Amino acid sequence: MCLAVPMKVLEIKKDMAVVSIGQVKKRVNIQMIANLKIGDYIMVHAGFGIEKIDAKEAQKTLELFK
């Protein structure tokens, strides 16, 4: 089974972004996501951003993690 985690985009540099979930920050590859902006939420799996998601949906999932 695979698990993707919603994370907020903090920085973007070319094909990489710094994303966060709570206090955890991680650098991920974002080549598969077009039109990404700082503040967007993305699903992250195995070091790759795989999908841009709605902020409300991301918050729902993050609440479940708590």
Image (cartoon, grey):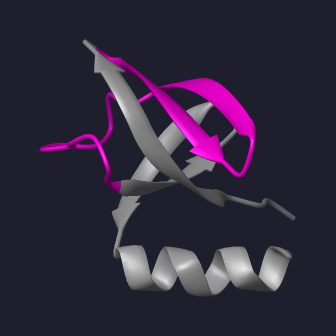
Q: In this view, does 22 lie to the left or right of 43?
A: right
Q: Give the range drawn in magenta.
A: 15-40
61 relative position to 48: left or right = right
Q: Which of 29 and 11 is in front in this view?
A: 11
Residue 35 shown in magenta: yes
- Point out the residue furthest to the top here: 14
Dividing the image into 4 quarters, which one contains the C terminus? bottom right
Give above or below for 55 relative to 35: below
Residue under the image location 52 percent in, 74 percent down: 58
The residue that appears at 79% across and 59% down in the rendered structure is: 2
The structure residue drawn at horizontal position 36% and vertical position 25%, both measured from the top left corner, is: 11
Measured as percent of width and height from the top left, residue 4 is found at: 67, 58
Q: Quadrant of residue 3?
A: bottom right
Q: Tell me where residue 27 appears, x and y as whole percent.
A: 57, 21
Quadrant housing residue 62: bottom right
| Quadrant housing the N terminus | bottom right
- In the image, residue 42 sits, relative to residue 11, either above or below, namely below
Q: How many marks?
A: 0
Q: Position of residue 37 (x, y in %)?
A: 20, 42
Tell me if residue 3 is in the magenta stretch: no
- Image position of 46 (left or right of 32): right
Q: Nearer the viewer, residue 31 or 42?
A: 42
Q: What x and y, as percent, mark residue 33?
A: 28, 43
Which residue appears farthest toward the left when viewing the image?
35
